[in-house]
Image (spheres, grey):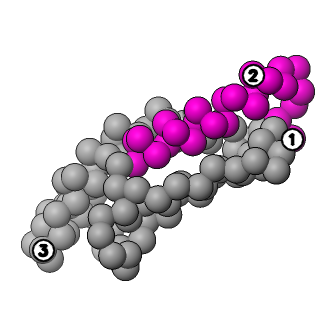
């Protein structure tokens, strides 16, 4: 298989009629938020980010956070703005962390 660097990959996508520029912007804005969710995941929580291009409308992202200190609580939202969904998930995830300080995530 031919290995493509990022620039060549995006060029090939563009030639195929795929415009990834808005997705790159959303994921770039989300990098620090994803890192925070990664840290929560390493402490026993679970995070899923789904991209569903078959949905009607523009709500292609699903963010799900569960487990760990959230107990039976969970976050699940669909939307078209990935950074906003991740911020909302982190707000829900941080509230139980503050309420249960001193307790391990798992």
Q: Which residue is mark 1?
A: 106
The quarter of the image holding the N terminus is: bottom left
Q: CA separation, marks 3 and 1? A: 45 Å
Note whether 102 is above or below 3 in the view shown.
above
**Which secondary structure, mark 2?**
helix
* Depth order, front residue of 50/7: 50
Front of the two marks 2 and 3: 2
Q: Which tag, 1 or 2, sits closer to the chain's start? A: 2
| Residue 57, percent from left and from top | 30, 70
Q: Which residue is mark 3?
A: 17
* Depth order, front residue of 86/31: 86
* Depth order, front residue of 77/29: 77
Q: Categorize mark 3 by other alpha carbons within 10 Å: few (<14), some (14-19), many (20+).
A: few
Relative placement, left or right, of 54 versus 66 is left
**Which secondary structure, mark 1?**
loop
| Res 98 quadrant in image | top right
Which residues are drawn in magenta? 82-106
Q: Which residue is mark 2?
A: 98
Q: Is residue 9 magenta?
A: no
Q: Which tag, 3 or 1, sits closer to the chain's start? A: 3
């Amino acid at each position: 298989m031919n290995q493509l660097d990022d620039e060549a990959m995006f060029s090939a996508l563009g030639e195929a009629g795929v415009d990834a520029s808005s997705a790159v912007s959303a994921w770039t804005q989300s990098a620090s938020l994803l890192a925070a969710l990664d840290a929560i995941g390493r402490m026993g929580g679970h995070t899923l980010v789904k991209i569903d291009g078959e949905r009607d409308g523009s709500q292609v992202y699903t963010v799900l956070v569960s487990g760990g200190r959230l107990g039976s609580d969970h976050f699940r939202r669909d939307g078209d703005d990935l950074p906003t969904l991740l911020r909302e998930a982190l707000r829900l995830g941080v509230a139980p962390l503050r309420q249960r300080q001193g307790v391990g995530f798992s």
